[in-house]
Image (tube, grey):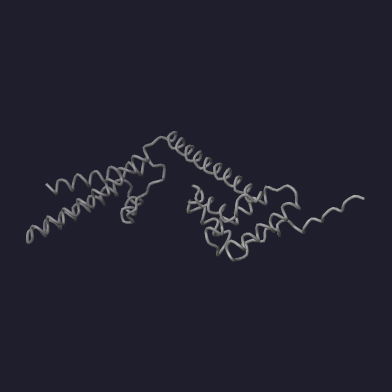
């Protein structure tokens, strides 16, 4: 019975492999280097011969072992069937994915992009509120960083990794606080206001975290604008 099951699984493995290689648009490939060599040199017939040789080898070994140790031979076939069944199930899952139409894949990609765009808009709206709060003095910088970290984007490992790369050597909370500072400064249209805000938030950063801000945000603003003299 196990021998029959192993043969059927081998046939299913060969059929699914051929279908995947022929219908996946190049996204699937033969992972076994020996099978890949036979396929590249001798085509589908070579691959089929390789699979057949593997099947006969396993059956032959199981038969030889069973003559002296029947239980051991049965366990060999059980292991072979289990391993091959996992390969067949994985190939079947790949076939299901590859079977989806280009229109369906395009629709799924559009939905994914829409979700990412929605996340970006939500994060932008949150940063606008936080920047407005720290600019007006209603929201401490430390609390703004905490709120930014509790958002969906603030919990995204990829986003935090990007901030950590930009603000090298700083904690996640310090990176988020620096991001709030940058966002608040970029919202200012008057150079004098932006300069004063950068100075105040950099000082608040130092009082909150015990270290200077990772960037001197005033440097991006150039020299401090001169205060216009009052007209006589």
What residue do we see at 13% from left, 49% from top? 2
Residue 59 or residue 218, whichever sits in front: 218
Q: Residue at x 73, y 47 (%)?
A: 189
Q: On the rendered structure, is 62 left or right of 224?
A: left
- List the single residue furthest toward the front: 138
Q: Nearer the viewer, residue 24 or 37?
A: 24
**x, y percent for residue 190:** 75, 49
Measured as percent of width and height from the top left, residue 179 is found at 60, 54
Residue 5 % position (x, y): 16, 46
Residue at x 49% of width, y 50% of height? 150
Which residue is more in the foreground, 49 or 179? 179
Residue 14 vs 143, above or below: the answer is: above
Horizontal side of residue 47 vs 166, given as left or right = left
- Counting labels gives 0
Residue plotted at (56% across, 53% down): 143
Residue 223 x/y as whole percent: 77, 59
Task: Point out the residue furthest to the right here.
Answer: 232
């Amino acid at each position: 019975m196990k021998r029959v099951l192993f043969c059927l699984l081998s046939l299913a493995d060969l059929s699914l492999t051929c279908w995947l290689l022929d219908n996946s648009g190049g996204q699937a490939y033969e992972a076994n280097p020996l099978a890949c060599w036979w396929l590249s040199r001798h085509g589908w017939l070579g691959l089929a011969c390789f699979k057949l040789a593997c099947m006969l080898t396993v059956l032959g070994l199981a038969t030889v072992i069973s003559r002296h140790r029947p239980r051991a031979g049965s366990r060999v076939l059980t292991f072979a069937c289990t391993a091959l069944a996992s390969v067949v199930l994985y190939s079947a899952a790949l076939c299901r994915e590859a079977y989806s139409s280009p229109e369906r894949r395009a629709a799924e990609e559009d939905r994914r992009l829409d979700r990412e765009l929605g996340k970006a808009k939500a994060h932008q709206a949150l940063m606008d509120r936080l920047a407005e709060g720290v600019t007006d003095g209603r929201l401490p910088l430390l609390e703004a960083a905490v709120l930014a970290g509790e958002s969906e984007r603030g919990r995204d490992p990829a986003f935090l990794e990007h901030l950590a790369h930009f603000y090298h050597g700083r904690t996640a909370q310090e990176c988020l606080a620096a991001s709030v500072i940058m966002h608040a400064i970029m919202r200012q249209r008057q150079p004098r206001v932006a300069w004063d805000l950068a100075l105040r938030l950099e000082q608040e950063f130092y009082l909150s975290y015990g270290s200077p801000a990772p960037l001197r945000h005033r440097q991006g603003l150039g020299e401090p604008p001169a205060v216009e003299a009052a007209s006589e």
